[in-house]
């Protein structure tokens, strides 16, 4: 689509926000030679760090005119920030997984530009693999934002608010909850002075497997074996939160394999 | 320890069992040039597959005399199998994470030789990273089994039955439960025709992170942000098992970060 590429080359884009999403999106733009006009936000130190990293100018006081504004602030602040944009010719997109595009309250064209990844400031990421979920008000904006995302990543998908909520929720299960299980597992191994590092090969293999096998088929462990001896033995060792999770997960595993 | 290496070279070892643990241990032995005398079991087809893979002779009828027997059968069968070994000079080790060495019922020296990994038949594994947890009746046997495990892996640790139970339980949290969360996550994404593959980069990153950061510090998501709007929105979309897990995990995350 040459017209979009042409447009993308001349499109003036501003990122609003100074957190992890803003930082990584700015880096992804720079790495893929997509021009960025400004990074705008409140936290001067954080903006300066992004600017040092990307050579994009920043401001805490004067938001520049642009064709596209990407709002990369936390969910609670999107509405307020969206009111700062006064250009009716602009296209404005937020990057939240859980909010509709109508959370944006200004008089302009609205969109959602949702990158699915867990961003932490310190880590380098391969942006080419990050899925982007895009929703705009009209086909032209949809095409432009998809083309922009495709300059960064190979995984770009149109998706409405309803679908995005499920994307976000799937990520909560597959990422946030998984990390919490790692934290609980580490509490158990720490309690016995067993190095948690010993479990990393097992964890790596668990994840490697599901790149090739449906996780439902890859399930192992006492619950799917319906091994009540081990399940009881573990329950005797566990307390409170660990026990609650242990029971909830085992019950769910048994239900999935119709063992109850 | 030259005497142990000397002994290991001449030690005659038999693996009993024909499942995934037997198959992978046999492969680990062969890859590290550790002699194996026989693989013994009931399932002829499975034994033949291991034998084809490793060139170790197998039998379903006649258990050969050996210095060391490694019992790689499921927990329920260990006791019965252990009674087949009649050599009072033998050292016999089981490979279970949840049973004491005294589950072995014959008149011989007893031990536990527990490799911590999730074994599936079809996958090649890097055995050098697999942690082995070793317990024997006396120092000499302990040294021999640790030396044997160190020929396969860099991560070898002495551990008694009590500690092994916690190792196993940690693995259940960090591997079995994590895989179940992947399965539940896939149910959610499947329900919306969102490719589960889109979540693999996120999952990979989640796991990559905890190689460098304590999982407790790496936690992200609505619960640790105490974002009640998103938590409620997700609860409205979820049903039954998904909802139970969603609530149990979020409650546990909030407790870990003292948000309740």
Image (cartoon, coloured by chain):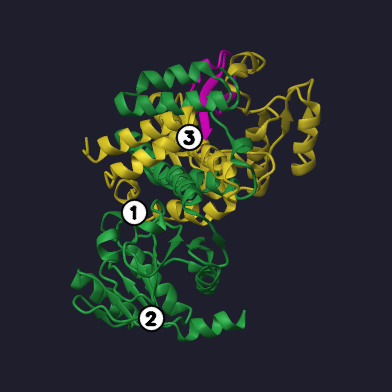
Chain colours: A green, B yellow
Residue B213, label in figure: 1
The subunit letter for the residue under badge 2 reads A
The CA span between labels 1 and 3 is 21 Å
Residue at image position (73%, 32%) is B38
Foreground residue among A257 and B120: A257
Could you tell me if residue A122 is visible in this image? no
**Drawn side of residue A239 relative to residue B88, left or right:** left
Are callouts 1 and 3 both on one chain?
Answer: yes
Q: Where does the image place residue B202, in percent across and percent down from the top left?
A: 48, 54
Q: Secondary structure at mark 3?
A: helix
The CA span between labels 1 and 2 is 31 Å
Q: Secondary structure at mark 1?
A: loop
Q: Quadrant of residue B68?
A: top right
Crowd band around label 3 with a 10 angstrom C-alpha radius: few (<14), some (14–19), many (20+): many
Q: Where does the image place residue B31, in percent across and percent down from the top left?
A: 66, 49
Q: Earlier in the sequence, mark 1 or mark 3?
A: 3
Q: Secondary structure at mark 2?
A: loop
**Drawn side of residue A138 relative to residue B25, left or right:** left
Disc 3 target residue: B177
The subunit letter for the residue under badge 1 reads B
Residue at image position (38%, 37%) is A185
Are callouts 1 and 2 both on one chain?
Answer: no
- In this rendering, the label closer to the viewer, 1 or 3: 3
Disc 2 target residue: A36
The CA span between labels 2 and 3 is 43 Å
Foreground residue among B122 and B60: B122
Could you tell me if residue B227 is visible in this image? yes
* Stretch in magenta: B88-116
Residue B228 on the magenta span: no
Residue at image position (30%, 70%) is A16
Q: Where does the image place residue B134, in percent across and percent down from the top left?
A: 47, 33
The subunit letter for the residue under badge 3 reads B
């Amino acid at each position: 689509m040459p017209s979009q590429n042409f447009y993308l080359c001349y499109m003036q884009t501003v990122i609003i926000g100074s957190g992890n999403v803003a930082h990584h999106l700015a880096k992804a733009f720079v790495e893929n030679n997509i021009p960025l006009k400004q990074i705008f936000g409140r936290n001067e130190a954080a903006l300066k760090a992004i600017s040092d990293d990307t050579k994009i100018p920043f401001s805490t006081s004067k938001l520049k005119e642009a064709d596209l504004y990407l709002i990369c602030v936390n969910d609670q602040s999107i509405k307020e920030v969206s009111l700062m944009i006064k250009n009716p010719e602009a296209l404005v997109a937020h990057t939240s997984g859980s909010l509709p595009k109508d959370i944006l309250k200004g008089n302009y064209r609205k969109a959602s530009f949702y990158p699915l990844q867990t961003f932490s400031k310190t880590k380098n990421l391969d942006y080419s693999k990050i899925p982007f979920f895009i929703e705009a008000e009209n086909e032209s904006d949809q095409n432009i934002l998809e083309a922009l995302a495709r300059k960064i990543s190979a995984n770009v998908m149109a998706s409405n608010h309803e679908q995005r909520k499920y994307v976000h929720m799937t990520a909560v299960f597959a990422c946030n909850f998984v990390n919490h299980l790692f934290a609980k597992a580490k509490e158990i191994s720490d309690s016995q002075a067993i190095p948690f590092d010993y479990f990393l090969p097992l964890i790596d293999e668990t994840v490697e497997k599901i790149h090739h096998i449906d996780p439902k088929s890859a399930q192992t462990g006492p619950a799917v074996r319906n091994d009540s001896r081990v399940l009881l033995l573990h329950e005797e060792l566990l307390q409170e939160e660990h026990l609650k999770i242990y029971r909830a997960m085992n019950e769910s595993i048994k239900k999935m394999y119709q063992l109850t």
